[in-house]
Image: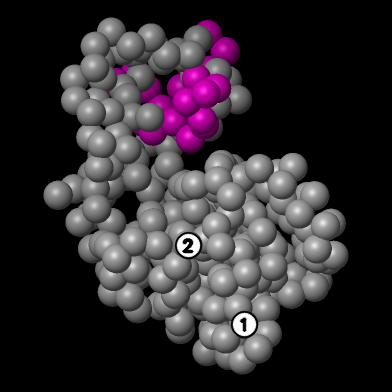
């Protein structure tokens, strides 16, 4: 959520060097943010963004970032909305890893794909899954995935087979789920080797289905809940967009046009 600081509580005056009037982006879920909406100005259905007039309360522990002047409001909001995903990808992926990313053609998936390719390096492999023609073409244009798969992430067996086909008969070392629809837990788990890591960034994930599903198929994988926060995640993601022209161009097409 973007907004301008109207006032501070007495205990947080000048937090992080900010002052009244500064434009900031909150980095906590709207479900945790008291928000009074006075007027809805415009709904951007294609960008999942809404322009409103209103007042929000950010608590002392609420994380926020001052808006950078070089990226623009809409692009910054889009990137900061998923800032936890790329830095967690950086932590999980090691050189030489085979990485499978579900939802790789969306904004979080594109960012994660870029990071995964850098971290896995020339001896690793990045396999990206996208669903629609549009997201598949975006992912191909980004050009960081060794293999791009188009398919339905809810079809667990089919997706597992496609991943193994793309990875010389082996499953992925690290799987990152960025899909925004339910029912993709088993495709993520079945595509990950025993001892590997499955990271669920998607809030559409049923962690009951993931835990019981892994048990049910005897999959010895680490199931990691996607934490939207990590120390330094905002600046990490903004720097990624600043320094990767291909990512920036695609995101600007998605959110500025």
Residue 200 in percent (x, y) is at 62, 52
- Residue that appears at 80% across and 63% down: 217
108 lies above or below 38: below
Nearest the eye: 109 or 89: 109
Label 2: few (<14), some or many (≥20) within 10 Å?
A: some
Q: Is residue 170 above or below residue 70?
A: below
Which residue is nearer to you in this view: 61 or 249?
249
Q: Is residue 43 left or right of residue 238?
A: left
Is 153 left or right of 241, judged from the image as shown?
right
Q: What colour scheme governs how the chains and residues are painted in the rendered image of this protein?
A: one colour
Instruction: Classify mark 2: helix, strand or loop.
Output: loop
Q: Quadrant of residue 220?
A: bottom right
Asked if the stretch drawn in magenta spans residue 162, the answer is no
Is 199 above or below relative to 116?
A: above
Give the CA distance from mark 2 to mark 1: 16 Å
Mark 2 / mark 1, whichever is N-terminal: 2
Q: How many marks?
A: 2
Residue 20 among magenta residues: yes
Q: Residue at x 46, y 84 (%)?
A: 146
Name the quarter where the N terminus is drawn.
top left
State which quadrant residue 18 falls in: top left
Q: Which residue is mark 2?
A: 152
Q: Which residues are magenta?
A: 10-33
Q: Which mark is residue 164?
A: 1
Specify few, some or many for label 1: CA neighbours under 10 Å numbering under 14, 14-19, or 20 or more: some
Please name the residue shown 74% across and 42% down the image.
208
């Amino acid at each position: 959520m973007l907004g301008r600081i109207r006032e501070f509580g007495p205990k947080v005056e000048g937090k992080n060097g900010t002052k009244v009037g500064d434009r900031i982006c909150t980095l906590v879920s709207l479900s945790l943010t008291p928000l009074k909406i006075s007027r809805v100005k415009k709904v951007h259905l294609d960008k999942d963004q809404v322009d409103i007039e209103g007042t929000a309360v950010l608590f002392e522990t609420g994380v926020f970032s001052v808006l950078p002047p070089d990226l623009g409001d809409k692009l910054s909001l889009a990137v900061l909305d998923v800032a936890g995903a790329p830095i967690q990808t950086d932590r999980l992926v090691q050189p030489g890893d085979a990485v499978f990313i579900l939802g790789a053609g969306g904004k979080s998936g594109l960012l994660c794909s870029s990071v995964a390719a850098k971290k896995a390096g020339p001896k690793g492999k990045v396999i990206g899954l996208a669903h629609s023609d549009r997201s598949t073409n975006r992912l191909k244009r980004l050009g960081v995935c060794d293999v791009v798969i188009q398919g339905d992430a809810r079809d667990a067996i089919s997706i597992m087979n496609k991943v193994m086909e793309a990875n010389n008969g082996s499953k992925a070392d690290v799987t990152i789920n960025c899909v925004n629809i339910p029912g993709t837990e088993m495709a993520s788990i079945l595509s990950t080797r025993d001892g590997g890591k499955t990271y669920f960034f998607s809030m559409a994930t049923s962690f009951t289905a993931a835990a019981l599903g892994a048990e049910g198929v005897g999959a010895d994988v680490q199931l990691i809940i996607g934490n939207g926060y990590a120390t330094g995640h905002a600046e990490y993601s903004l720097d990624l967009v600043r320094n990767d022209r291909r990512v920036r161009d695609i995101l600007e097409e998605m959110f500025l046009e």
